[in-house]
Image (cartoon, coloured by chain):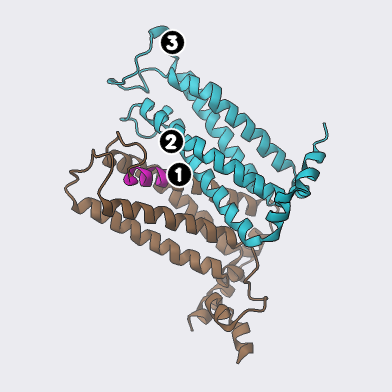
Chain colours: A cyan, B brown
Amino acid sequence: MDLVFIFEWLDTSTLADISKASAGVFAMVQTVHIASMVMLVGMILLGDLRMLNVVLTDVPSETIIKNTGKWIFLALVFIILSGIYEASAIAMKLAHNSFFFAKMAGLSMGIIFILTLRGAVYRRAPGLVYPAGSSEVLPQSEILEPWVVKLVAVTSLCIWLSVAAAGRWIGFS
Amino acid sequence: MLNELLLKFATWLDSFQSSTDLHESLYMYGWVESTHVLTLILFLGMLVVIDLRLLGVAFKEVPVSTIVERLDKPMMIGFVVMVISGALLFFAIPIRSTQSIWFRIKVVLLISAGINAFLIRNMTRSSDMSWDNDPVPPTRIRVGAALSLGLWLSVIGVGRSMAYDWWDCHKELPYFMYWAAGCVNEMAAFE
């Protein structure tokens, strides 16, 4: 399916008139986009590294996941809003930019991954990552093997780091 | 005087073939820049977690010392690689970076953020840490954390602005701007 019509519509929208008007404001929005990306990927990184037993091993993984959730969604809102603003200013350039499509594919995959598999698996992490004293006690049959949790953590890291890297390469192509 | 010295240093770096090669390489420059961004995520991501805890808005049930001490290592790993990749980016484009007002502000902000981090560390070390388990740390610590977040947000902003040529030396600018950006030749043309 040819998606060029979406970019043509965006390129002629009122938002594009605004975003193309000032390079200074565009640079500020870019800064918000990068700062939200730091927040988003930083919080995801923390959860994933915890599940891999790399950081904060003496803090229950449940505490980490619970605390990062709110910031992840807050950052996502800012990322998407600032991203749409940026895209409107260079819509026709993006229409033929393969890194942009790679990034959008990765971003969609990442969001679906967080909402479904990552959350579900992390809630069923075994005692290895839930130290004694954890408030949430799951029935033995629901607890997953450590390798499953770690596989999800590595997958999550790969998805989000490639989204960030693809974003940087949009500017080079 | 300082502007001349800095330009001399940049011109010397620029004379290396490897500087030109890196700048003109098809992929290497992009990879160095990507490394800079990815390690910046690791460094600033951990820093944000620490600062949000110091502000008393996240991880309130975890002691401050646990967050600060445990995240120090991954944060510093990110910092070291970020600085190395940043130095390589400077080495690839030394003259334009030296004469960039944005880069100059960035260096000042980086030094300020460093001093601020040092002050927070000193304040934490000199206190008895009786507030270690408090959900919200004392005001002076929170001020430091807010400053830290503000300074790093500004570092991102000026870093991003370096890509634009609004105030590059080849533009027509007031004398003060030429001086601030270190446009030595353009300043001479004024006299």
Number of numbered tags placed on the structure image: 3
Residue A173 appears in view:
no
Disc on res. A46: 2
- Mark 3 = which residue? A142
Q: Quick check: A170 above or below B107?
A: above
Residue A138 appears in view:
yes
Inspect the magenta stretch and tell me whether residue B21 lies in it. no
Give the amino acid type for the residue marked by disc 3 in the picture: Glu
Asked whether, in this view, residue B46 is left or right of residue B65, the answer is right
Which residue appears farthest toward the front when viewing the image? A14
Q: Quick check: B83 above or below A69?
A: below
How far is disc 3 from disc 1 in space, using C-alphas? 32 Å
Disc on res. B168: none
Which residue appears farthest toward the bottom when viewing the image? B191
Mark 2 lies on a secondary structure that is helix
Which badge, 3 or 2, comes first in the chain's sequence?
Answer: 2
Evaluate if marks 3 and 2 touch, with contact meaning CB atoms under 8 Å apart. Answer: no
How far is disc 1 from disc 2 in space, using C-alphas? 8 Å
Give the amino acid type for the residue marked by disc 1 in the picture: Gly
Pick the front one: A133 or A30: A30
Q: Residue at x 39, y 42 (%)?
A: B49
- Mark 1 = which residue? B45
